Image: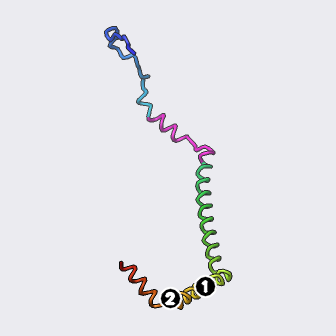
Amino acid sequence: MKHNFDFEQCSDENPFCVPDGYFEEFNKRIENLIAHRRPSFAERLRQYRYVAAAAAAVLILVAGALFVESYLHSPQSEQQRARVAAYNDSINQILIDETSESLIEDYIIAEAN
């Protein structure tokens, strides 16, 4: 795009003007706007929503921790742990009984190579 603009036809005058006393009154007008502005209902509600969301998150975490704690110390859980421990002991005993010294020696030799 080519523009044929002749700068020599332009005048040296500034076409923009500022109303009288604009900058002298600017600070006062801004302070008045800030001082008299009340937060809207939506802005106040937003603050409470954040607080409610944080409280709900804390409540969920605490309830989850209490549930896990009560589940781990329930009698059923104790019985399950006892059964698993007995099973592991029986498996370990079978492995100890069935493993001979020659199998252990073969394993050590195979691992060394």
The residue at the point 41 percent across, 20 percent down is 17
- Give the vertical position of 7 relative to 20 (above or below): above
Q: Nearer the viewer, residue 55 or 45?
A: 55
**Quadrant in which the C terminus is drawn:** bottom left
Q: Nearer the viewer, residue 9 or 66?
A: 66
Q: Secondary structure at mark 1?
A: helix
Q: Is residue 99 left or right of residue 50?
A: left
**Residue where numbered disc 1 is placed:** 87
Residues shaded magenta? 27-43
Q: Nearer the viewer, residue 100 or 63?
A: 100
> Type of residue at label 1?
Tyr
Percent coordinates x, y for residue 2 in the rendering:
38, 14
Q: Is residue 63 left or right of residue 20?
A: right
The residue at the point 42 percent across, 84 percent down is 106
Q: Secondary structure at mark 2?
A: loop
Q: Nearer the viewer, residue 103 or 41?
A: 103
Name the main secondary structure of what is drawn in magenta. helix
